[in-house]
Amino acid sequence: MAVDEINQVMDADEIRRAIARISHEIIERNHGAAGLVIIGIQKKGVPLALRIRQAIQAIEGADLPFGTLDISLYRDDYGSRTAAVHPTDIPHSLTGRTVILVDDVMFTGRTVRSALEALVDFGRPSAIQLAVLVDRGHRELPVRPDYVGKNLPTSRREEVLVTIGEAPGDDRVCIQKPDEEEAAE
């Protein structure tokens, strides 16, 4: 069996710069940090959301509310997948706030659709904006991110692997291509 080809497309510095750019764009678009709530989609959106929150707080000197959102029970393929359920922790009402929803990779749009449905259980935000590290295309739903770290054209057969380590130096984004035999099947 051949090993899949893996190509790194973003290193730790590129991810750091993307997070800084996204944070500045969020501040600019929202005229500061007042009224913002940062929410990370479990699992890989959470560490990205924390880093965006830290960057905005450092720039604006404001303490931003933060939450985590698990969308497992809201997925349209719930029951056909085996996925671990992670905690949802949104300690503040979202009513009247601008929610910055954060995830690692934007693909078909189905995760975001599930997240939007889940957020309604926590109030009625005045706006929801989406920030993603990687937008790889292939939408199945009419959803697009407001903030993108990198647009990364891929084939449907490729997989985007995001590693967000404990230390920022451990971060990377790779594309895993199927080996020739698997791609032919």
Image (spheres, grey):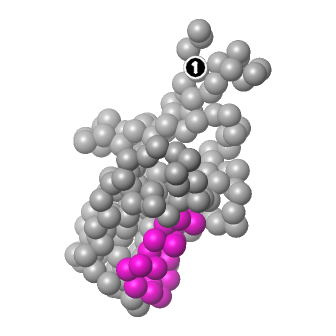
The residue stretch that appears in magenta: 112-130
Crowding at label 1, few (<14), some or many (≥20) Cα neighbours within 10 Å?
Answer: some
Q: Closer to the camera, 153 or 110?
A: 110
Q: Closer to the camera, 38 or 24?
A: 38
Locate residue 63: give its quadrant: bottom left
User: Quadrant of the image for the N terminus?
Assistant: top right
Whether 115 is among the magenta residues is: yes
What residue is at 70 percent from the left and 67 percent from the top?
142
What residue is at 54 percent from the left and 24 percent from the top?
6
Residue 116, compared with residue 54, is above or below; it is below
Amino acid on which disc 1 is placed: Asp
Give x and y (percent) for residue 80: 56, 47
Residue 153, compared with residue 114, is above or below; it is above
What residue is at 58 percent from the left and 19 percent from the top?
4
Quick check: can you spot residue 141?
yes
Q: Which residue is mark 1?
A: 4
